[in-house]
Image: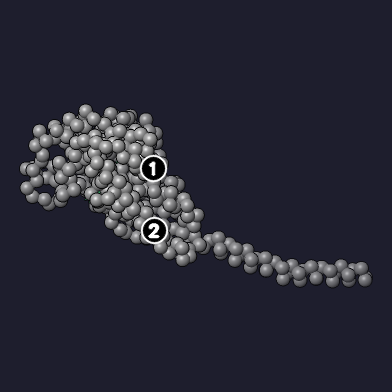
Amino acid sequence: MKKYLKKFVEARVRNMVAGLFLPAVLLMLCVFCGGCSKQPQEYRSVDTVMGTIFRQQIFVTESNEATENITGEITACVRALETDHLSRRIDGTEIFHVNALAGQKQKISGELFHILEQCETVKAASGGAFDVSIGTLVSLWDIDAWAKEQEGFVPPQEDAIATCLEVMEAESLWLQDGMVCVPEGMQLDLGAVGKGAALDRVKLFLEENPRVSGAVISAGGSILTYGSKPDGSHWKVAIVDPFDSAQTIGILTLDGQWCVSTSGDYERYVEAEGERYHHILDPHSGRPADSHIKSVTILAKDGLLSDALSTACFVLGVEKGMKLAEYFQVEVLFVNEAGELFMTEGMQQYFRKL
Ligand code: FAD
Ligand code: MG
């Protein structure tokens, strides 16, 4: 009987301990899981950088004072790329000096050297369809001054175009040992890669901030997806309808980290005497590219490459552009003047037409 009573008391004590212990464990688990499921803090901003709209949506776990101004820091980082290095319009940037001192070898930053090296690789692979030494032509066409409702635009004279082409055909950029030399009569314009290079800079910034769990950054037609969304779903990137830029033609559903760049004839253009001139020039003709394309979207892991290739593929058209995309192992989607869509097999996995 005593033995039975002892077992009974032991069992009651065990139950009491369990009764106290289990709720405590459950409470701790709840607190812990509650911590896990805490929603990341979202930061948004819209600025103007590089003559275009710069949008950020950033998700931060464990927000604190240091993360409060994260969008401001990123904008400053991109603006510094524009005002210290890439803008040829701002007196004092590296590109401004390189252009101003054409004909002379100049030491440049590692970042600009790397950007120019990548540009030269794309130039060679595209047979010159992409060429950042197009600056004199861009100035001749006065692209910066274009406004959609502009009246009285007069396209440049053929002989002026021919003079620019002569230099571009006869000379090339010299790039070696951290130095650059732009031949006299040539000017660099990084309009076709600046926003892609900006995304690469932002990606590095985000990688150095472990508190950032996910982000979508867009600079004009170039978009970076980074990390993951708080609800674990895929990133969605809408592709603008080049016939009506208020509409979308489809959606890219993307996992992880991608750069998406679109070049089209619908944003920067001018009309004169019934003819429409857009801002993507064919470096062989010196005139707006006539490849029967309305827009090109590139999907790549690298920002600069996606931006450079969207411009290059626009100039090359569908057939040659597809080959260039394959060469660089990126995905491409073309919309031609008839509204037909052409895309690489890989792009079909991500793109859904609306
Ligand atoms: P993309 O296809 O990416 O590039 C087209 C641009 O690249 C053209 O406008 C021309 O500049 C150049 N280009 C044309 N054809 C070729 C070719 N075949 N090969 C290589 N390059 C080519 N715009 C302003 O109005 N004001 C500004 O202050 C201003 N500042 C800028 C600062 C920087 C650093 C950069 C990179 C751009 C700036 N821009 C500015 C330009 C503006 O944002 C352009 O609209 C943009 O660069 C064109 O990009 P896109 O994506 O429309 O076309
Ligand atoms: Mg581009």
Label 2 crowd (10 A; few <14 / some 14-19 / many >=20): some
Image-based side of 49 in relation to 233, left or right? left
Picture quadrant of residue 307: top left
Picture quadrant of residue 333: top left
SS for dot 1? helix
Q: In which quadrant of the rendered image does the N terminus lie?
A: bottom right
Label 1 crowd (10 A; few <14 / some 14-19 / many >=20): few
Residue 351 % position (x, y)? 36, 42
Q: Determine which residue is flagged by label 1.
A: 110
Vertical side of 203 occupied by 347: above or below:
above
Q: Determine which residue is flagged by label 2.
A: 73
Which residue occupies the foreground of this view, 347 or 139? 139
Residue 315 % position (x, y)? 24, 35
Q: Residue at x 48, y 65 (%)?
A: 64
Q: Residue at x 50, y 62 (%)?
A: 62
The residue under label 2 is which amino acid type? Glu
Image-based side of 138 in relation to 353, left or right? left
Image-based side of 145 in relation to 69, left or right? left
SS for dot 2? helix
Vertical side of 35 occupied by 255: above or below:
above
Which residue occupies the foreground of this view, 141 or 316? 141
Q: Residue at x 19, y 32 (%)?
A: 167
Q: Residue at x 45, y 62 (%)?
A: 67
Vertical side of 277 occupied by 69: above or below:
below
